[in-house]
Image: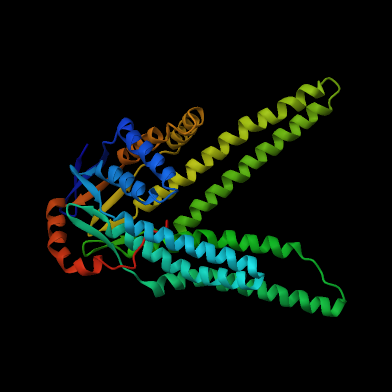
Amino acid sequence: MESTNTENGTNIINKPFEFTGKAGEFFAIWIVNVALTILTLGIYSAWAKVRTNQYFYGNTLLDGTSFRYTANPKQILKGRIIAFIVFVIYFAASNVSPIIGAGAFFVLMLLVPAFLVMSMAFRLKNSVYRNVRFNFDKNFPSVYKIFAIPVVVMSSYIFVINQFQDSLAANAGVQPEFPIFVFVLLGLIMLMAPWWEYMITNFKVKHAKYGDAGFSFSATTKNYYWLYLKMILWLIAFSALIGLGVAGMTALFNSDTADSSKVMQLMPILMFIVIVPFYLWMFAYMATKRTNLLYNNIDIAGHKTKSELKTSYMMYLYFTNTLGMLLTFGLLMPWAKIRTARYRASVTSVDVAGDLSQFTTVQADHQSALGEEMGEMFDMDLGF
C-alpha cells in the first residue's frame, strides 16, 4: 500500500513492489524447461532461462507496471559455449602439464573481471521498465584495480613468508614449518572479505544506469565490517554454548549414574537439532542483512529503494522450501521460487521523490541516443 510524506518540500511517495506469479503457472513453464533441457543435452537451458526470467520479470510490478526481460537465448547460449570451451581448454591443459595448466588458470583469472563486466552489461541492458532499458557502464580499468588489490596483498604476504622461511632454513640447516603463517593468511583473507564485498557491490551499483540516470550507493565499508563482525560474534557465542553443552554431556557420561549408551546415542541427535537450525538461521541472517544493506542504500535521481526482509521469516521460507522439495524430489521447486519472490517483493519498495511517470518519460526520451550502444555484440551472460 502506498504511503506519502513530505521531505524538504518534496512529496515522497512509497511505492511497493508487487509479485503476481502463481505456482501452478510457473510449474507448467518449469517442467517443460526441465524436459527440453534434458532432451537437448542442455542446449535448451538458454531458452529455459529466458522463459523463466520473462515470467518473473513480467509478474514483478512497480506502480502498476511490470518489468520486461528481452534477452536473446542465442546470446546466452553463446556465452555458455564460450564458458564450456574455456573450461575444456583449461582441463586439457592441466592434463598435459601442471605448468601449462597453471598458465591456463592464470589466463582464466585474468579474464574473470572482464567476464563480470560483460555479464552485468548483458543482464541490465536486457532489463526494461516502462520502455526504458537499464544499462551498465563497462569500466574495465576500475574492475581490474578492484581485483588486483587482494591479489597483490596475498602475493606479497606469501612472498615475504617464503623469503623468511628460506632465510631461516639457510641459517638453521632445516626447513621450518610455521602453521601460524597459515592462520595469519586466513585471518588476512577474513579481514579483507568485507572490504572486497563492499568494493564489488559499490562497483556494480555505481556503474548501473536506468536510461541515462546513474545509481548511487551510500553504504560504506564500515557497514560491511559491522555486518561481518556481528556474524562472527554470533558464531563465537554459539560455539561457546556448544562447548558448554558438550562439556555437560561429557560430565554426564562420566558420572556413575549415567547410562553411557543412551548418552552416546542422544548426543548426535541433540547436536543435529541444535547445530542445523543455527546454521540455517545464520544463512538466513546473512542473506537478509546483505540484501537490506544493499537496497536501503541505493538511490537513483532522488528515488530511494527500501528492503525490509526479516531473518525469522526468511529462515521459515528456507526451511519449508527445502523440506517441501526434499519430500517431493524437487517437484515443489516452482512453488518455493514463487513464494520466495512474492515475499521479497512484498517487503521491497521505492521512495519516489515527485512523479515516477515523469521521471520514466524523461529517461525514455533520452533512451534513443543509447540504442547503438545497447547492441554491442560482446556482452554475454556468463552467470555472474
Residue 222 higher or lower than 264, as above or below? below
Residue 140 seen in render: yes
Who is closer to the viewer here, 221 or 127?
A: 127
Q: What is the quadrant of the C terminus in the image? A: bottom left
Residue at 23 percent of width and 43 percent of height = 61
Place of residue 84 in the rendered image (x, y in percent of width and height, measured from the top left): 48, 60
Q: Seen in the image, is 268 located left or right of residue 105?
A: right
Q: Identify the image's colour scheme: rainbow, by chain, secondary structure or one colour.
A: rainbow
Who is closer to the viewer here, 311 or 150?
A: 150
Q: Seen in the image, is 241 located left or right of residue 82?
A: right
The number of callouts visible is 0
Residue 248, picture quadrant: top right
Residue at 64 percent of width and 72 percent of height = 157
Residue 72 higher or lower than 315, as above or below? below
Residue 179, picture quadrant: bottom right
Residue at 38 percent of width and 65 percent of height = 117
Farthest residue toward the front?
A: 39
Residue 348, picture quadrant: top left
Residue 220 seen in render: no
Who is closer to the viewer here, 12 or 102?
A: 102
Place of residue 306 in the rendered image (x, y in percent of width and height, measured from the top left): 31, 47
Place of residue 2 in the rendered image (x, y in percent of width and height, measured from the top left): 20, 39
Q: What is the quadrant of the N terminus in the image? A: top left
Q: Seen in the image, is 124 located left or right of residue 242?
A: left
Who is closer to the viewer here, 191 or 372?
A: 372
Residue at 24 percent of width and 65 percent of height = 374
Place of residue 332 in the rendered image (x, y in percent of width and height, measured from the top left): 42, 31
